[in-house]
Image (cartoon, helix red, strand yellow):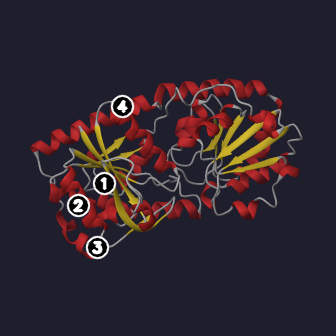
């Protein structure tokens, strides 16, 4: 099967990791993959890494959204017409191009599958989660015209259905982790940072990740000299927070770690992984930590609570995160057997439900289902016919 994958290769984020892992796994299973990715002018001049790689011009891209150039629609259409894939899979990057993809694919007679990544909090308990809900409301009328929309949890599926996306078009395929690569193993990170016990956060340092709540809790809990909190990642709030939470408080800032094996080593050496987010989708960082056999504490934002529910970890409410962690952190410090037990349960949960192998098998079945449907019927685009001319 020939899959045209539309996504991005940078800047580093969960969407980039998702695209890399899935496309590599599809190639390993013998499928042909053409990778169409957004690139700014200076990137697009570089020679593509693979013959089947196509640069889609954009004016701006970030970890959160992408602004395509005025000619992106034509470049994409011409590339798809030349490549003639069996199916298009768009790992949506929150760009205006998301809204015209159904029309482009109908014009070319190509089935269209999308993975919808935006984080959410089903209860809309704060401004951040309310803003994310607006993103779902904006996209839903257009997602209704995709052949299939992949989401990571049944909570997310119910939200899209309530917003008008037909149930038959929404498929739940959770993120998957390579459990051979992300696994328990030796690590020297504790010796490197001078810790007997290690607590880790990996992710963006941004408002929606609520890292300050973790830092406040850590400082108030008085964790002592033997415990360290390692912060892995970068983002707009890093420079603001670092002066107030540094080595004197037992906080170690490692910044963005590009090397995947180094990130795995950090996870393997941790006693607990903490994710205090206000909104989430299904965090790959959380699944990677669980696969490494680490005790995990995460909020019930998005699908993360669903992942840890039933004893696979500790589920926090997105409200009063600091006060909850202030109580829990000393508990994990003083009872290492708790970390060991939850770490074992966390890895078993991933083995049961969230492996990359399972993810790809479900994806292959979905592609075949969409192809079979496309042979027997045509799905009308209806009122979307004028959208492409309006936006591009």
Q: Which of disc 4 and disc 2 is earlier in sequence?
A: 4
Residue 192 seen anywhere in this rendered image of the structure: yes
All told, the count of numbered labels is 4
Q: Which of disc 1 and disc 4 is earlier in sequence?
A: 4
Separation (CA) of disc 1 from disc 3: 24 Å
Between 41 and 272, which is closer to the camera in this rendering? 41
Q: Quadrant of residue 227?
A: top right
Separation (CA) of disc 4 from disc 3: 36 Å
> SS for tag 2?
helix
> SS for tag 4?
helix
The reply to whether discs 1 and 3 touch (Cβ–Cβ < 8 Å) is no
Which numbered disc covers residue 165?
Answer: 1
Q: Is residue 252 left or right of residue 211?
A: right
> SS for tag 3?
loop
Circle 2 sits on which residue? 77
Q: Is residue 105 above or below residue 360?
A: below
Which numbered disc covers residue 392?
Answer: 3
What residue appears at the point 81 percent right and 55 percent down from the top-left corner? Answer: 245
**In the picture, which quadrant includes the C terminus?**
bottom left
Residue most extreme to the left = 376
Circle 4 sits on which residue? 28
**In the picture, which quadrant includes the N terminus?**
top left
């Amino acid at each position: 099967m020939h899959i045209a994958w539309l996504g991005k290769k940078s800047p580093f984020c969960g969407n980039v990791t998702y695209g890399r892992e899935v496309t590599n796994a599809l190639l390993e299973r013998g499928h042909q993959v053409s990778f169409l990715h957004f690139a700014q002018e200076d990137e697009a001049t570089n020679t593509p890494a693979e013959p089947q790689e196509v640069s889609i011009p954009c004016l701006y891209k970030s970890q959160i959204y992408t602004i395509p150039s005025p000619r992106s629609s034509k470049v994409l259409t011409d590339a798809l017409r030349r490549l003639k894939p069996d199916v298009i899979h768009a790992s949506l990057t929150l760009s205006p191009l998301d809204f015209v993809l159904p029309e482009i694919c109908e014009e070319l007679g190509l089935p269209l599958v999308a993975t919808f990544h935006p984080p959410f909090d089903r209860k809309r308990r704060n401004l951040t989660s309310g803003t994310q809900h607006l993103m779902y409301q904006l996209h839903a009328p257009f997602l209704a015209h995709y052949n299939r929309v992949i989401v990571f949890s049944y909570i997310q599926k119910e939200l899209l259905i309530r917003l008008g996306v037909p149930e038959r078009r929404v498929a739940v395929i959770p993120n998957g982790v390579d459990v051979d690569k992300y696994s328990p193993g030796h690590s020297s990170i504790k010796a490197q940072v001078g810790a007997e016990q290690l607590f880790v956060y990996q992710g963006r340092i941004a408002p929606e990740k609520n890292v300050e709540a973790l830092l406040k809790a850590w400082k108030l809990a008085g964790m002592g000299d033997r415990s360290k909190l390692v912060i892995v990642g970068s983002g707009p709030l890093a420079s603001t927070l670092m002066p107030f939470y540094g080595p004197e408080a037992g906080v170690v800032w490692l910044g963005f770690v590009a090397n995947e094996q180094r990130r795995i080593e950090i996870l393997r050496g941790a006693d607990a992984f903490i994710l205090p987010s206000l909104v989430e989708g299904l965090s790959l960082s959380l699944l990677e930590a669980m696969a490494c056999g680490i005790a995990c504490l995460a909020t019930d934002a998005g699908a993360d609570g669903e992942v840890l529910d039933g004893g696979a970890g500790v589920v926090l409410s997105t409200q009063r995160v600091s006060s909850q962690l202030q109580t829990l952190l000393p508990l994990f410090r003083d009872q290492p057997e708790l970390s060991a037990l939850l770490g074992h349960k966390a890895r078993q949960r991933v083995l049961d439900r969230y492996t990359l192998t399972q993810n790809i098998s479900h994806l292959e079945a979905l592609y075949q289902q969409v192809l079979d449907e496309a042979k027997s019927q045509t799905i009308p685009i209806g009122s979307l016919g004028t959208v492409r001319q309006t936006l591009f």
